Image (cartoon, rainbow, N blue to C red):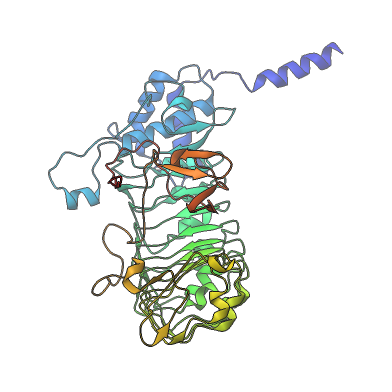
């Protein structure tokens, strides 16, 4: 019995044995390991001014007596800090030549506190391995370091959204990210010809935001996406993609789990795909494609998407008629304004019992809104809260809640073709201090909203929160406040 107890004690305490090795030696082995030979620079530590050598010196100063895993985690985070804090890159050299490069907006506790799990934006598991890195909107510049690959067996979330001058040209680190589930680098200067093939290493990825960056002017490679069988959220908007040498449907058909797909403000070159590219994604729940030009119109095969709830394709250059097969879906939000759609509204759309929002204005439709559709309106006991059409001499609508420009969606003049600078035209941000009424909770600040909360959208009408965009709890901006004068 004593022998067994001693054995258990040795096993239990072994995970907490501190390293007797010098951090400098531990880091040298990591940087020159054959496992990362084709990912990190094996010779970087021979350059006394490299960010790797400077990070090694930091570890030597602050991590004596720590475990080898703690030294590794500290070293990688130190590499990130030094490589992206006030450092130039090709993008800054082109846009701000001769100017001083700004430093991080917030860097609380970084480097000087040996307990890296307390650094701002860092979260660890119970073994002090880094699980999350959230540096969104933090003014990162420089180049993202490939040493992040050394965290591949623990890092689950990497949030880099809205660091426009953060550069990356060859993200080899992605090849080692076997545990990464959430990756956001939208609105950065990550650069690749289309989708980087290194993405294939992130096999556990659930959510990916690669919008409004420089993964552009190339193809959406099938080899990049095919291994991502767990992916359910994908944003590829505000970019340009080459359609000359690949099949876009093959690139998007990789995952049977994809639910949310965003392709707004995309420019295809040299040819435009049809919307058939989405009809083979069986679990598709929401897809927004505003300002992206497609060939043809709405395919009848949209009726296959039985899970589809939210579809937006405003100003997409769509032609042809409205497919009656759309009634086979469970769609509740549909935005199709600003196209060249023609013909009548199918009476079968009256079977869309869950429909809440439908906007068809600024098209070339004719006839009247079918009575079956009008029967879905709220004043007849249905759920249809908003119905927008043109309501002119060629089309009647007795149940519309707004007509034409009064719906607030129509752009005066021609909309921009291709990705507009600074992101899409359909995005709205709200202050976290704004108050909303939540069913069974009363007034709640937007910063405290939870998925599933039912928010009041009109008199005694509530809608659930399906998802959030990028929540930036530490960002301060100016908002326009609109009020009314009593009486």
Residue 176 versus residue 375 in the image, above or below? above
Residue 195 rendering spot, x and y as whole percentages = 42, 62
Please say whether residue 38 is visible from this viewpoint. no
Residue 477 versus residue 279 in the image, above or below? above
Find the residue positioned furthest to the front. 487
Q: Is residue 327 left or right of residue 5?
A: left
- Residue pictured at 53% horizontal, 52% vertical: 460
Q: Is residue 305 left or right of residue 421?
A: right
Residue 17 rendering spot, x and y as whole percentages = 60, 18
Q: Is residue 403 left or right of residue 96?
A: right
Find the residue positioned furthest to the left. 98
- Residue pictured at 56% horizontal, 57% vertical: 231
- Count of marks overlaid on the render: 0
Find the residue positioned furthest to the top. 2
Query: Who is closer to the viewer here, 198 or 262?
Result: 262
Residue 9 versus residue 135 in the image, above or below? above
Query: Who is closer to the viewer here, 289 or 240?
Result: 289
Please say whether residue 481 is visible from this viewpoint. yes
Query: Who is closer to the viewer here, 161 or 11?
Result: 161
Residue 230 rendering spot, x and y as whole percentages = 60, 56
């Amino acid at each position: 019995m004593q022998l067994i107890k001693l054995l258990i004690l040795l096993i239990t305490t072994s995970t907490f044995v501190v390293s007797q090795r010098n951090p400098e030696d531990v880091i040298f082995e990591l940087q020159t390991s054959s496992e990362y030979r084709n990912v990190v620079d094996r010779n970087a530590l021979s350059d006394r001014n490299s960010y790797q050598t400077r990070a090694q010196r930091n570890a030597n100063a602050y991590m004596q007596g720590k475990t080898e895993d703690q030294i590794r985690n500290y070293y990688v985070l130190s590499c990130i800090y030094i490589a992206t804090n006030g450092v130039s890159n090709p993008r800054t050299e082109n846009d701000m030549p001769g100017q001083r490069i700004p430093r991080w907006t917030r860097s609380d506790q970084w480097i000087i506190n040996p307990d890296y799990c307390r650094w701002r934006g860092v979260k660890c598991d119970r073994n002090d391995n880094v699980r999350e890195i959230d540096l969104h909107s933090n003014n990162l510049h420089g180049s993202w370091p490939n040493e992040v690959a050394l965290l591949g067996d623990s890092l689950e979330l990497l949030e880099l959204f809205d660091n426009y001058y953060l550069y990356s040209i060859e993200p080899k680190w992605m090849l080692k990210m076997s545990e990464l589930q959430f990756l956001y680098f939208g609105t950065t200067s990550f650069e690749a010809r289309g989708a980087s093939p290194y993405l294939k290493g992130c096999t556990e990825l659930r959510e990916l935001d690669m919008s409004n960056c420089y993964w552009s002017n190339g193809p959406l490679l099938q080899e990049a996406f095919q291994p991502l069988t767990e992916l359910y959220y994908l944003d590829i908007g505000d970019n340009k993609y080459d359609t000359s040498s690949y099949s876009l449907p093959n690139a998007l058909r990789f995952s049977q789990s994809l639910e949310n797909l965003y392709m707004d403000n995309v420019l295809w070159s040299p040819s435009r795909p049809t919307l058939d590219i989405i009809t083979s994604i069986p679990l598709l729940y929401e897809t927004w494609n505003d300002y992206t030009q497609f060939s043809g119109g709405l395919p009848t095969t949209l009726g296959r998407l039985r899970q589809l709830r939210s579809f937006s394709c405003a100003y997409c250059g769509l032609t042809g008629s409205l497919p009656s097969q759309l009634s086979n879906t469970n769609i509740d939000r549909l935005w199709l304004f600003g196209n060249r759609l023609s013909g009548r509204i199918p009476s079968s759309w009256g079977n869309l019992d869950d429909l809440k929002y439908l906007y068809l204005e600024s098209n070339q439709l004719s006839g009247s809104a079918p009575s079956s559709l009008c029967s879905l309106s709220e004043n007849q006991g249905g759920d249809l809260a908003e119905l927008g059409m043109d309501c002119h001499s060629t089309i009647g609508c007795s149940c519309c809640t707004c007509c034409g420009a009064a719906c607030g969606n129509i752009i005066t003049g021609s909309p921009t073709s291709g990705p507009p600078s600074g992101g899409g035209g359909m995005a709205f941000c709200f202050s976290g201090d704004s108050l909303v009424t939540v069913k069974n909770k009363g007034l709640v600040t937007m910063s405290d909203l939870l998925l599933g909360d039912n928010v009041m959208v009109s008199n005694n009408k509530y809608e659930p929160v399906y998802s959030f965009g990028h929540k930036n709890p530490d960002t301060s901006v100016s908002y326009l406040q609109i009020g009314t004068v009593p009486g």
